[in-house]
Amino acid sequence: MYLLCTFKVVNATVYFMNEFKNTGGAKIGIVKSSWPFADLTVNRNKFELNVSLIGKLAFLPGDIKAISPHPGGYKMRAGIRIEHRIPYYKDEILFWSYKSPAELIQQITATGFMANTDTMSQTVQAEVRQLQAQGGFAMKRKPLIMLLVLWLAIIIYGAINVSLTGDARIMMSTIPLAFSAIILFSMATLLLPSFAHSVLKPGYTAADVKKFLILLIIISLFVTVISGISATVI
């Protein structure tokens, strides 16, 4: 009888997988991000939902009260609702992917996270608590404000020149310059670790915002090309 019980305990331990990763969409408060801009990563010690620039939410065992199915809604697949105890985070946190809610919950449970009552190392606790205190948003406020001010200054400069000269081509040539600033900022964040360190909050890397920045570069390049073509046509 003793050997049989020991065998069952061993089996139960082996059942826990090391890590579960899944890509999908998410909704944090009123902000929604579609597939593939949300990445869910769960292991026995940490539950992490990275929604690119919108935020990276991290939880320790005990931080999450429950994970329940969510029926979905407008432009949202059925997924899971994450009920938590972190005051810095929005109350409504949803995640969905091409897996069913039942399958997502099953695979999260299989990591052992929800049942983990072990004492976490001080390093892991400090890392997660720091991310939680920052509220999830990836970038520091000052660099973003500086980029926005530069972008607006270039656009306003073009608008003033158009009003003074009446030449719309000036505005069409100014728009590519404004969006080039966004492209340079995004590429520097992705490619230069020292620059990324200066614009991202502690605990974040360029990989955490990679998808969003690539999308931003693509949109900016598209606007730049269209504006350049329009400038030659006018």
Image (cartoon, rainbow, N blue to C red):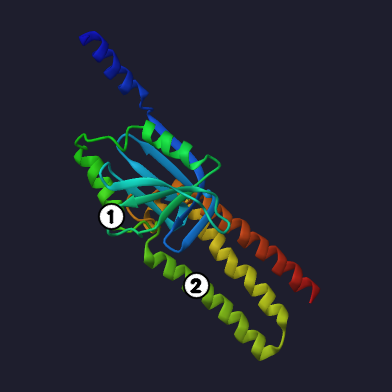
Identify whether 44 is placed above or below 49: above
- Give percent across and percent down for residue 147: 47, 68
Disc 2 to disc 1, C-alpha distance: 36 Å
Q: Residue at x 31, y 38 (%)?
A: 114
Q: Residue at x 32, y 52 (%)?
A: 202
Please identify the quadrant where the N terminus is shown. top left
Do we see residue 71 in this rendering?
Answer: yes
Mark 1 crowdedness (10 Å alpha carbons): few <14, some 14-19, many ≥20: some
Which residue occupies the foreground of this view, 60 or 223?
Answer: 60
Callout 2 amino acid = Leu
Identify whether 11 is placed above or below 82: above
Identify whether 10 is placed above or below 145: above
**Residue on which disc 1 sits:** 86
Secondary structure, mark 2, is: helix
Query: Which one is in front in this view, the residue at disc 2 or the one at disc 1?
Result: 1
- Give percent across and percent down for residue 144: 43, 66
Q: Residue at x 67, y 61 (%)?
A: 222
Quarter residue 161 falls in: bottom right
Do we see residue 195 in this rendering?
Answer: no
Which residue occupies the foreground of this view, 157 or 44?
Answer: 44
- Give percent across and percent down for residue 151: 53, 72
The disc at residue 150 is 2
